[in-house]
Amino acid sequence: MSNLPAFGIDLGTGNIKIYNNMDGTILREKNMIAVMKKDTLLAYGDDAYDMYEKAPANIRTSFPLNNGVIADIKDMQTVLKCFITDLTAKQKYSGADFFLSVPKDITEVEKRAFFDLISDANVKAKRIMIVDKAVADGLGLNVDVKTSQGMLVVNSGFDTTEISILSLGGIVLSKLIKIGGRKFDEAIIGAVRREYSLIIGEKTAEKVKIQLSSPDYDDTVPPVVYGRDIETGLPVERQIPVELIESALNENINIIIDNIKVILERTPPELAADVYRHGIYLTGGSASLRNFGKLINKGTNLKVNLAEDPVSTVALGLARVIKEEHYRSVAYSIDGMSPR
Ligand SMILES: Nc1ncnc2c1ncn2[C@@H]1O[C@H](COP(=O)(O)OP(=O)(O)OP(=O)(O)O)[C@@H](O)[C@H]1O
Ligand SMILES: [Mg+2]
């Protein structure tokens, strides 16, 4: 390993997380770009998200990743380049090693696109290494993923939920499904519209979802939302019963549980025995969702271990790959590819 700086990047569809080994910090921002008149960069990250759902027609705000894969490589490169420039602004920067986590269940072509993304982003990448996202999750949870002990990781993020069985530093089985925080928000928007002819925005839906997911939330106080009444067209405020939101969320949670069961059915018996002993590990921002862990426990009869910092677990795992020689072997390069 060179003495070059290294970055551990978890490119999420909702949030980008970058571990920086020069100061040991993890940057966490919205993975979003705001562009004016075709290609004038206006804002990126959280600043772009502030404009989301509020921008006039000549400003385009978008998420460069979609369903776990790159939707717009140019936008993604711009966002990445801006963050790396910010992170290296205060020192002489002559290049770095990049460790990138990617979902397992994507095609080789999609995986290569992640590699190209970094090699072409103008960030002076010296080496680009890939780490399977679930393996990074395991390390971020402080589990020794290199042993033969089987581990079931469920990472529920923004566009996706990835369900994986790990053993010996690799992935035995995995499934990426297109359900995550965004679907939960949409379910809330749909239910409020159906029941109250009220249109609310994604940010409002997410706020209510997070509010209700807090362990301190007082269930006797229904959340209040602001939106537009379909019939009158006027802005209104309205209380929404907790039960309505719960049932909207549960439909999606149940699909995830069904998929966990499918993975469990396919898990080799010795690994299944390990999963039975240790339970399921739940990570990703949506891990904190109301009733999620409880319903998985009910649906599978397995204990559920919730990550301490679910949004940053993957980045914490990448940090360990960068810092701990012992775990370097879980990172791999893509054959025949080296940075240009
Ligand atoms: N306390 C909370 N309760 C419920 N949901 C939450 C909470 N905190 C964050 N979230 C949700 O977590 C999601 C973001 O999580 P995360 O950063 O892990 O996703 P991502 O990595 O960007 O997405 P993906 O892994 O699917 O590409 C958002 O949808 C957000 O609403
Ligand atoms: Mg993620």
Image (tube, rainbow, N blue to C red):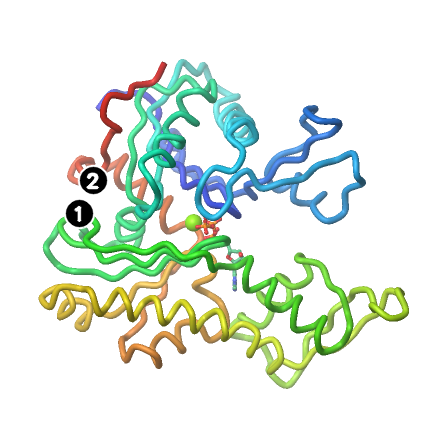
Tag 1: amino acid: Gly
Front one among 266 and 19: 266
Check disc 2 and report the residue beneath it.
Answer: 330
Quarter of the image that includes the C terminus: top left
Quadrant position of residue 107: top left
| Earlier-in-chain disc, 1 versus 2 | 1
Residue at 26% across, 48% down: 135
Tag 2: amino acid: Val
Quadrant position of residue 176: bottom left
Residue at 38% across, 29% down: 22
225 to the left or right of 20 = right
Q: Using the image, tell me which numbered label, if any, was put on residue 169.
A: 1
Q: Position of residue 57 (x, y in %)?
A: 79, 39
**SS at circle 2:** helix
Residue at 58% across, 72% down: 212
Quadrant position of residue 247: bottom right
